[in-house]
Amino acid sequence: PVVIAYPGFGSVRLTWNGINGASSYAIFRTEGPKGCHAGKIKLTETTATFYNDKGLQAGREYFYIVIPKGPSSSCFGPSSQCTAAVPIELPEVKVLCPTEKIV
């Protein structure tokens, strides 16, 4: 599948195209200087063509691959390309109130 990553506030939303014959998709994430080449962890398996990865550190680069799976554990397709995303920080918003009353 072709994966697109959308950085959010401490999160990354992944979307991808559906693959004919796929009954689910396994999503893997890694981080660090080796990108998708080492240290992958399986986040989940889903039947959807999107996934929201939450609770991430803003400013840190995360790498993802998605693998389409068939109806049995021995049936799977080629993985997606390695897709990177960097979550953004939630901006600090303050409410300012005037200290003096206008008469």
Image (cartoon, rainbow, N blue to C red):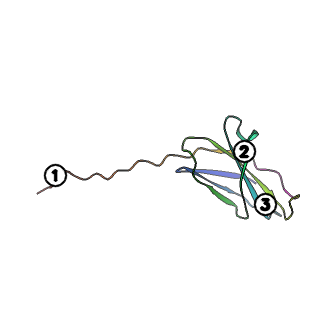
Could you say where residue 77 lies in the image, as x and y percent from the top left? 84, 55
| Left or right: 41 in relation to 76 | left
Could you say where residue 38 lies in the image, as x and y percent from the top left? 75, 39
Q: Is residue 85 magenta?
A: no
Residue plotted at (85% across, 56% down)? 76
Residue 19 numbered mark, or none: 3
Marks 2/3 in contact by CB < 8 Å: the verdict is: no
Question: Identity of the amino acid at label 3?
Answer: Ile
At numbered mark 1, what does the secondary structure look like: helix, strand or loop? loop
Could you say where residue 45 lies in the image, as x and y percent from the top left? 73, 59
Residue 100 numbered mark, or none: 1
In the current view of this chain or complex, which residue is farthest to the right?
74
| Left or right: 78 in relation to 62 | right
Q: Which residues are magenta?
A: 75-80
Most foreground residue, 58 or 85: 58
Question: Identity of the amino acid at label 1?
Answer: Glu
